[in-house]
Amino acid sequence: MALLIGTLMEPRVFFRVTQGISNPPDAIKALYTFTPAVLHGYCRHRVQGEDYPAIIPEDGQSVLGVFVTGLTDANVSKLEQFEGSEYDREAVTLKLVVKAGDAKGEGQVLGEERSSTAYVFNNPDRVEKGEWDFEHFRKEKLSTWARDEIFFSEDGDGAQPF
């Protein structure tokens, strides 16, 4: 299980990374569950010059992400390679979202806590102030990140579609 906080929140990118295709058969999709979740004590920022975000510890902040279950060791290995050396997989405690709120989280109802992992950025000098915008990513960048003919760098330096 893992908390996805950026490009991987989009199922087509998640499946592209873990399965090699953005739209696998329904039988494969059914192996995973995706649940909105909140991680307190962190903030999601833009990474300088990149399409993807970073989360870093920040008191008083929280990040809305997607809690995914059903991951195999092979999936985790692919996620590790995708995230690259600028991210550390860390144990975190999150809260599942029972009722979604508005874009700012107003009206949101949180439920039970879960232990998970999240990929935390370890290069704060590359973080820009300001929240990374998932909807902007979906509208402007997703087509590049989710197409099946895309290749990701395999040098352990993270996601670089080419």
Image: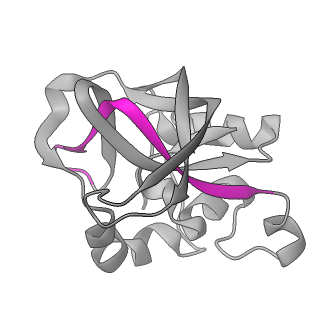
Taking the spot 28% from the left edge, 76% from the top edge, the residue there is: 140
* Residue 153 seen in the current view: yes
Percent position of residue 52, x then y: 33, 51
- Comparing 133 with 104, the one in front is 104
- The answer to if 39 sits in the magenta stretch is yes
Q: Position of residue 115 (x, y in %)?
A: 64, 27
Residue extending furthest toward the right: 27
Q: Quadrant of residue 11?
A: bottom right
Figure check: 86 above or below 53? above
**Of residues 104 and 12, the one drawn nearer to the viewer in this rendering:** 104
The reply, left or right, for residue 89 in relation to residue 28 is left
**The one of 87 and 156 positioned closer to us in this rendering:** 87
User: Quick check: is 118 in the magenta stretch?
Assistant: no
Reply above or below: 145 against 128. Answer: below
Looking at the image, the residue that sits furthest to the left is: 129
The span picked out in magenta is 32-50
Q: In the picture shown, does residue 48 fall above or below 93?
A: below
Locate residue 47, reporting x and y percent. Answer: 22, 43
Q: Residue at x 74, y 59 (%)?
A: 19
